[in-house]
Image (spheres, grey):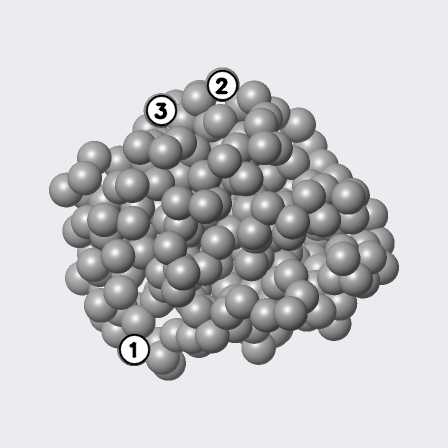
Amino acid sequence: MLADLMAGAAADAADRERLKPLEAVRAEALARPAAIDALAALAPSDRVKIIAEVKRASPSRGDLAEIRDPAQLAVSYETGGASTISVLTEGRKFKGSLADLEEVRRSVALPVLRKDFISSPYQVYEARAAGADLVLLIVAALDDATLASLYALITELGMTALVETHSEEELHRALALGAQLVGVNARNLSTFELDRDLFGTLAPQIPAGVIRVAESAVLSPADVRHYRAAGADVVLIGEALVTGDPVATLAEYLAV
């Protein structure tokens, strides 16, 4: 599944590049105002931080929410106390777009994450051009050379990489980059199986000073409490927010 998602995202990016060449997107990216400091926004605190996600669908769950107005949803997240907004921009399985990210960027003052299947510099420049402050890098999908070059470009553009891992070996690769924001995804993107305890297994190996993000398998305050007890500084939440009252749900989760 991960290989298919990566291939589809790369093909769609290639289509966009034929319409707008790399140099044009690079110029747009460099003309943007400076990115917001996501590491400051997500820094460890006496309460959990939340990355709230604009997510219409997923390969594992199908359609989740129509989300006609992603900007309005993002404003609800900001009102509810989220620290960062994640926007799915993958179109084939998640029904997102860069237009969603641009609308969200115009509507909130929080850092915005481009969550997609990134494998090329073109996609990184697109992210900055659209106003992203963070970009997701999935260790499982990238060889070391590509991972390092994309991480360096994200940093050069003033953004922050959320480096996502699913195993001890991937965690070591993320830390070798010098990643300051490391995610542990409970969902195996090859099989889409969930292991909520994976975060607790890997978190002790994440050194002090690196922000620890728990991803997936969050459907209730008990799940947030579980991750917080295991050492999560930040929890990324999508489905539970788009399928309910986002402000009320955030209040419940932030009270953990």
Give amino acid for label 2.
Answer: Thr
Give the x, y percent position of residue 70: 65, 57
First in sequence, mark 2 or 3: give its number: 3
Q: Residue sitting at 14 percent across and 42 percent down?
A: 145
For the residue carrying disc 3, how many other residues have a C-alpha within 10 Å: few (<14), some (14-19), or many (20+)?
Answer: few
First in sequence, mark 2 or 1: give its number: 1
Q: Residue sitting at 54 percent across and 23 percent down?
A: 192
Is residue 111 shown above or below 195? Answer: below
Q: Which residue is mark 2?
A: 191
Q: Nearer the viewer, residue 248 or 179?
A: 179
Give amino acid for label 1.
Answer: Ala
> How much space separates mark 2 and mark 3, taking CA atoms?
11 Å
Given this view, does label 3 or label 1 mark the residue nearer the observer? 3
Give the x, y percent position of residue 246: 78, 56
Which type of secondary structure does the marked residue at label 2 adopt? Answer: loop
The answer to whether residue 224 is visible is yes
> How much space separates mark 2 and mark 1, taking CA atoms?
40 Å
For this orientation, the residue located farthest to the left is 145
> How much space separates mark 3 and mark 1, taking CA atoms?
33 Å
**Do the residues bearing badges 2 and 1 touch, measured as CB atoms within 8 Å?**
no
**Do the residues bearing badges 2 and 3 touch, measured as CB atoms within 8 Å?**
no
For the residue carrying disc 2, how many other residues have a C-alpha within 10 Å: few (<14), some (14-19), or many (20+)?
Answer: few
For this orientation, the residue located farthest to the top is 191
Which type of secondary structure does the marked residue at label 3 adopt? Answer: helix
Q: Which residue is mark 1?
A: 31
Give amino acid for label 3.
Answer: Ala
Say the numbered circle drawn on residue 100: none
Give the x, y percent position of residue 20: 27, 55
Which type of secondary structure does the marked residue at label 1 adopt? Answer: helix
Q: Which residue is mark 3?
A: 3
Which quadrant is the N terminus positioned in?
A: top left
